[in-house]
Image (tube, helix red, strand yellow):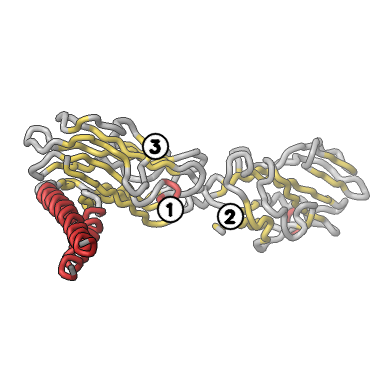
Amino acid sequence: MINIYKKDLICLAAFAMTLLVFGLPMVMAGITGTVDVAITSATEVSFDTSATLDFGEGTPEAGGATLQSNGSGSEDGGDWDVVAGELTLDNIGGTSVSLTLSSSVDASEFIGGTTPTFKWMLTDGEGTSCTGGMLNGTEAFVEVTKTELTVCGDFNPDAGNDELDIDFELFIPYDATDLSVPATITATATAI
Amino acid sequence: MKIQEKIIKRNNFPKKISKKLRFIVTHIMGLIILNFILISAAEVNFTDSSINWGNGQVDSRADYAILDSESNSVINGSWTPVQGFFVLENIGEENVSLNLKSNIDASDFIGGTNPSFKWKIVDTDSSCVNISNTEFTKVNTTENGARICDVFYNEDSRDEIKIYFKLTIPPDATKIGAQSATITAIISAV
């Protein structure tokens, strides 16, 4: 009787082992191939093709003239034509960027005379293109800088939310000097 | 007398069980041996097993770049077009069933907004019975993969399929840098 139970135990053990082995799938795997690609982050911003804002010619009155491009545009204290418009900057790359702006000239170099001002202001051109809002006060008119000024910390690449408008305000004093120097605005994008 | 009968019965009962177990074990072992014989005779091989598009980026203002190894084209991207495919051959002595799986899907391979990573099976020699994924189809990353052929023949004149790939890369792809996907063929003896 004892011998029979030993055999049974052996058989049970063997059965368990076979179940374990049999439980393995009747499958052979391990033949593989690979698909490779390398993706470069597209970091790029661009001004729209009509990236020029020209206030034209005029003469300031004694108190000076103020020209603004935002909204429908405005002119006060001179005989300039009203100019409405802005520079539009698109994030045409594939990644969010931090954006800085700089001007080639400051107010004294651009306009001259006594206490001229040359200011910029940024607004979302589409939806919420600048997540977190504009930086360094550029949501309102502030003096341009010749050094790079961070104006947006997270400029989106998403279609429908990837445009920023840059408007300008000039104060032209009565004694402004005609320097005929254009102002060039440079935008620099850095992937974040 | 009663005591003797009980002893006899107790002795016979385990013997019957033992016989049944041995019978079961013997048959299962036979099945396992048969299984191993079949598996040892079943083998497939990728004779072409690499597609590499190299480095590139999505064109400015493009919604997507599309890389297609079948049409040898790259649309809206700077990658070099690659005309290529995997060739999978049944080099074994048995017909097999065939599944394919990828180790990663589009979101892990490319990332960003609505990327896609698809394969397409082409069977020019009628090597495959009940073929599937004959149009570009999202790769399958499940454990068993996608069933491609119920029967993948081993005959010289019909033992081969081709696998093409197509990628859709959005401009906000998050998997920046070199990426690699591994495609695995899984066969079972039939």
Q: Secondary structure at mark 2?
A: strand
Query: B24 or B162, which is in the foreground?
Result: B24
- The x, y position of residue A59, in whole percent, is 84, 43
Up-down: is A75 above or below A115? above
Which of the 4 quarters of the picture holds residue B58? top left
Q: Residue at x 18, y 68 (%)?
A: A1
- The x, y position of residue A132, in whole percent, is 70, 54
Name the residue tied to disc 2.
A97
Question: Would residue A14 be seen by someone viewing this image from the given angle?
Answer: no
- The x, y position of residue B42, in whole percent, is 13, 46
Q: Looking at the image, do the residues carrying marks 2 and 3 touch, with CB atoms under 8 Å apart?
A: no
Q: Is residue A191 left or right of residue B81?
A: right
Q: Is residue B71 left or right of residue B64?
A: left
**Same chain check for tags 2 and 3:** no
Instruction: State the CA–CA distance, disc 2 to disc 3.
Output: 25 Å
- Which kind of residue does numbered mark 3 sit on? Ile
Q: Secondary structure at mark 3?
A: strand
Q: Is residue A87 left or right of residue B18?
A: right
Q: Residue at x 19, y 35 (%)?
A: B151
Q: Residue A40, which numbered label?
A: 1
- Which kind of residue does numbered mark 2 sit on? Val
Instruction: State the CA–CA distance, disc 2 to disc 1.
Output: 15 Å
Image quarter where the C terminus of chain B lies is: top left
Q: Secondary structure at mark 1?
A: loop
Query: B63 or A18, which is in the foreground?
Result: A18
Q: Residue B64, which numbered label?
A: none
User: Which of the chains bears the disc numbered 2?
Assistant: A
**Seen from this angle, which residue lies furthest bottom?**
A2
Q: Residue B75, which numbered label?
A: 3
